[in-house]
Amino acid sequence: MRNLNELTLLEAIDGLKKREFTSVELTNACLRQIKNQDSQIKALITTLEEKALEDAEQADRAIKSEGAVVFEKKPLLGIPYVCKDNFSTKGIRTTAGSKVLENYIPPFESTVTGKIKEAGAILLGKTNMDAFAHGSSTENSDFFTTRNPWDVKRVPGGSSGGSAAAVSTNMCLFAIGSETGGSIRGPASWCGVTGLKPSYGRVSRYGVVAMASSTDSPGPISKTVEDSAYILNVIAGKDSKDATSSHENFENFLPTVNKKNLDGVKIGKPKSYFEIDIEPGVAENLERAIQKLKEMGAEIIELDLIDPKYSIAVYTILQRSEVSSNLARFDGIRFGNDRTNFGFEAKKRIMLGTYTLSSGYYDAYYSKAQKVRTLIKNDFEKAFQNVDVLVAPSMPCIAPKIGESDKFPMFGELIDLLNEPSAVAGLPGITVPCGISEGMPVGAQFIGNFNCEDKIIYVSNLFQKETDFHKIGPKL
Ligand code: GLN
């Protein structure tokens, strides 16, 4: 018998509906796991034990008085979750992993956490991250480094590292992260869980501490693809508070067709994504995953896509330019501590971004990067004329040891090269566990055309149903 905190989100909802256990029991199971594990893993910056139990009692009362139908109005009722610390939570400290916001208590709620609250979920805590989401390891957090639950000497990935580590250790039923260029898919794959980066605009950015506003995309990190789809149903949609949020309607991201095979599905294999320097253990697992997809009936079509190495420069210039502009608001006068509190990485990015935006250099850098971004976007569009989804490794290697990234001044930008092309193009991507190398999890990602989350969810869900990698967890 599994502990309650080990259930998937959909299993937990089912159990709550059937009154097999209470939300208080479920919440206590997660809080116990946090108590037992977090001194070692360090996934959380803030834990909200008392408030969480109060909310759980309230959820139990609603389930008792209204019965299972209450879940039609409140699809996440009584479900404990954690959220990356860059989502503004009214009355709850929101640091974005930075000393600048060490004592910042937002007077308003982000759209994502507001929707989740409205859906009845219980916020257990706020998770660690690279400060202002700059990085891919959580080593740039101004507070502490989160440990990879599979091997505590390794990084969990970043910047949503605390969220991925919390899901991987069953401290919660699901987590919320955000991605600008790899920050959901990277840590989810390195921690052996599922991570969904929606299309740009699919989920509102309102109330998320901005990193690069033209690519920032909030999304779920969960135990299964179905769980991520269920959460996306709650958080997606047009928001009048975010002018870039999508008008595109959606009905239901949960896969409704109950087929077991992938007959008729065309999966593109971008050659350039497999020709870069990928660790042999990662490459082997990807080949096995592709073989599995073939056995399931998919047609694998090798195709040419722009070499992902070009996206490193595009992503770096766009992201740092937008960072320099977005971090200007932290002047120590209106809110937060003064600018001397910025960490090394933030200072570096602000300086480079200020350079690429300054007169005389704007055309050579920022404007040119935007043009190449369009080429990358067009290149994807061409590919999606012939295939339904693309498959690629989520990361080129397994999670590195803590401290290794010090050797690479541009670690954050370099390591996420397989996520950056789709991120700058605004496309959705999902990572699912597809194997183990040197005792560490490996992730395969599926990339979809703009606003085609349904397709990547469909394919990755069937793959997950036919494999067991998502059921293997770290030995704690
Ligand atoms: N690797 C990216 C960076 O360091 C991660 C950023 C993100 O997606 N928030 O910029």
Image (cartoon, rainbow, N blue to C red):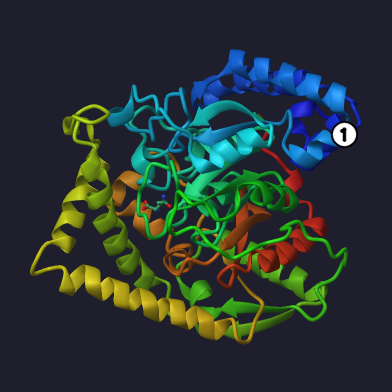
* Quarter occupied by residue 319: bottom left
In percent of width and height, residue 170 lies at 68, 32
On screen, residue 343 versus residue 278, left or right, reads left
In front of the other: 157 or 205: 205
Residue 435: image location, x then y, percent? 68, 55
Residue positioned 30% across, 52% down in the render: 408
Q: Position of residue 71 (x, y in %)?
A: 80, 37
- For the residue pair 299 and 155, the one nearer the viewer reads as 299
Identity of the amino acid at label 1? Ala
Which residue is found at the position 42% from the left and 24% from the top?
93
The answer to whether any part of residue 29 appears in the image is no
Residue 54 in picture, x, y percent from top left? 66, 15
Give the residue at x 58% y 73%.
449
Q: Quick check: 318 above or below 342?
A: below
Quarter of the image where one finds residue 372 = bottom left
The quarter of the picture where residue 434 lies is: bottom right
Q: Which residue is mark 1?
A: 68
> Quick one: quadrant of the C terminus?
top right
In the image, is residue 291 above or below residue 22?
A: below
